[in-house]
């Protein structure tokens, strides 16, 4: 743009028909050094205003700055850019840029561009912690796009545990980027995408207060089966024998009875076994882990029970049947306790399932998924995210504040 304008001016000059002094100021060379100097001056002025009202200073965001420069360079007429276009481009490149404000100002002098930016309402807003600017030539004037932003980190269990807070996450189902907030003191969390509404993670605090993924509570816990009976018994008899061992040892105990706060914490199988007590998800994980170790296909279901509300239970599959196992059952475990899923479906409404490796969700109709906990057509496993949004999806967007 600048080169073209200078060439035009030179061409005109040779005609001798125009008075340059009336409008042609020496145009600044808006190279890298100029851009850096401008941003630095803008930052100083904005920080003076922020200091005066005790708002934390802003700094530059170098990757965002160089993206902004090349974005503006690629536009023939930056002055006619829609700000939404700027937002979309930035958010596609930086999915964690959750707080964004942009301002486009044109003027014929640098000083008033700086003043405009310093007087901008977003400049003093403490939602933002960086300022970046890109100056461009527009006709005989200069223009600037100022971008105030704050980036939030990609969600990870490690970050959620170390400090909690706001994160962005790319949905493994629909690839949309969204923000989520995790408190360090969280209890059981079933995380769902606000765009497609599908669950993408099930997290829970363990007894030490660490947030873990549901699948990570499995430990490969096993119970001894009699080596001979293992071959003489039917699958149902073996399942019942394992269940009896768990039920005889572990007393049903709600979290409220043993944790000072009334918060939902999960225990691993060894911990439940050692405590000889646990609530529905503790004994379900223990029982499912023992069944899997014994070679059965078993899952923990989280969902709704008509009698108790939010609940967890176990489901196990033999060669031809599926059974719901109520792991909180006390007293003698008899054949009648092993309920076929089709019989149990009146009371048990599963929402998510998990085993040692995977979490499963469904979009099927209840009459289908209530009667079948293992069909891959009905229960799909949640895809594992391919790294924390290293490559943002096309069109990945966050809602603007
Ligand atoms: Zn989604």
Image (cartoon, helix red, strand yellow):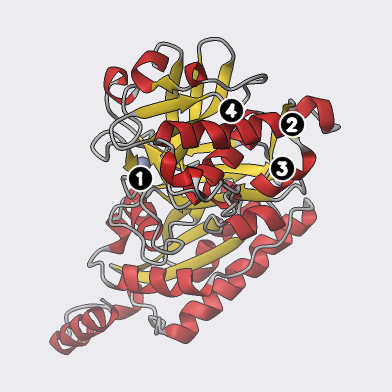
Dot 4 or dot 3: first in sequence order is 3
Dot 2 or dot 1: first in sequence order is 2
Can you identify the residue that label 1 sits on? 381
| Secondary structure found at label 4 | loop
Viewer-side label of 1, 3: 3
Can you identify the residue that label 2 sits on? 263
Can you identify the residue that label 4 sits on? 327
Q: CA distance from mark 1 to mark 3?
A: 29 Å
- Residue drawn 48% across and 16% down? 336
Viewer-side label of 2, 3: 3
Q: Where does residue 94 sit, x and y in percent of width and height?
A: 43, 61
Q: Where does residue 130 sit, x and y in percent of width and height?
A: 59, 62
Can you identify the residue that label 3 sits on? 273
Q: For mark 3, does the 10 Å Cα neighbourhood hold few (<14), some (14 to 19), or many (20 or more) residues? A: some
- Residue 395, numbered circle: none
| Secondary structure found at label 3 | helix
Q: For mark 4, does the 10 Å Cα neighbourhood hold few (<14), some (14 to 19), or many (20 or more) residues? A: many
Q: Quadrant of the N terminus?
A: bottom left
Viewer-side label of 2, 4: 4
Q: Where does residue 194 sit, x and y in percent of width and height?
A: 42, 36
């Amino acid at each position: 743009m600048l080169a073209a304008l200078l060439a035009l001016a030179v061409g005109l000059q040779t005609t001798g028909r125009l008075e340059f002094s009336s409008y042609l100021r020496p145009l600044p060379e808006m190279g890298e050094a100029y851009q850096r100097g401008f941003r630095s001056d803008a930052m100083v002025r904005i920080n003076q205003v922020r200091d005066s009202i005790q708002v934390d200073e802003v700094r530059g965001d170098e990757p965002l700055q160089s993206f902004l420069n090349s974005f503006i360079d690629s536009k023939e007429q930056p002055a006619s850019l829609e700000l939404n276009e700027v937002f979309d481009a930035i958010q596609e490149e930086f999915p964690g840029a959750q707080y964004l404000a942009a301002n486009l100002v044109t003027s014929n002098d640098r000083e008033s561009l700086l003043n405009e930016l310093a007087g901008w309402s977003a400049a003093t807003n403490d939602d933002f912690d960086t300022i970046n600017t890109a100056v461009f030539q527009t006709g005989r004037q200069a223009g600037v796009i100022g971008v105030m932003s704050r980036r939030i980190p990609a969600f990870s269990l490690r970050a959620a545990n170390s400090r909690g807070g706001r994160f962005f996450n790319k949905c493994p189902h629909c690839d949309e980027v969204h923000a989520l907030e995790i408190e360090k003191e969280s209890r059981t969390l079933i995380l769902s995408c606000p765009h497609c509404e599908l669950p993408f993670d099930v997290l829970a605090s363990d007894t030490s207060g660490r947030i873990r993924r549901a699948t990570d509570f499995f430990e490969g816990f096993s119970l001894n089966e009699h080596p001979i009976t293992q071959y003489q018994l039917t699958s149902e008899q073996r399942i019942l024998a394992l269940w009896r061992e768990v039920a005889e040892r572990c007393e049903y105990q709600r979290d409220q009875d043993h944790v000072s706060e009334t918060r939902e914490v999960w225990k691993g199988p060894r911990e439940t076994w050692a405590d000889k007590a646990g609530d529905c998800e503790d004994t379900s994980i223990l029982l499912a882990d023992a069944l899997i170790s014994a070679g059965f296909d078993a899952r923990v279901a989280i969902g709704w029970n008509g009698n108790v509300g939010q609940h967890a239970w176990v489901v196990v599959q033999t060669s031809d049947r599926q059974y719901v196992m109520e792991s909180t059952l006390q007293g003698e475990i008899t054949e009648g306790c092993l309920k076929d899923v089709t019989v149990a479906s009146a009371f048990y409404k599963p929402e998510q399932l998990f085993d040692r490796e995977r979490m499963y969700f469904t979009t099927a109709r209840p009459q289908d998924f209530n009667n079948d906990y293992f069909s891959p057509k009905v229960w799909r496993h949640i895809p594992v995210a391919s790294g924390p949004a290293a490559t943002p999806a096309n069109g990945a967007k966050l809602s603007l504040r």
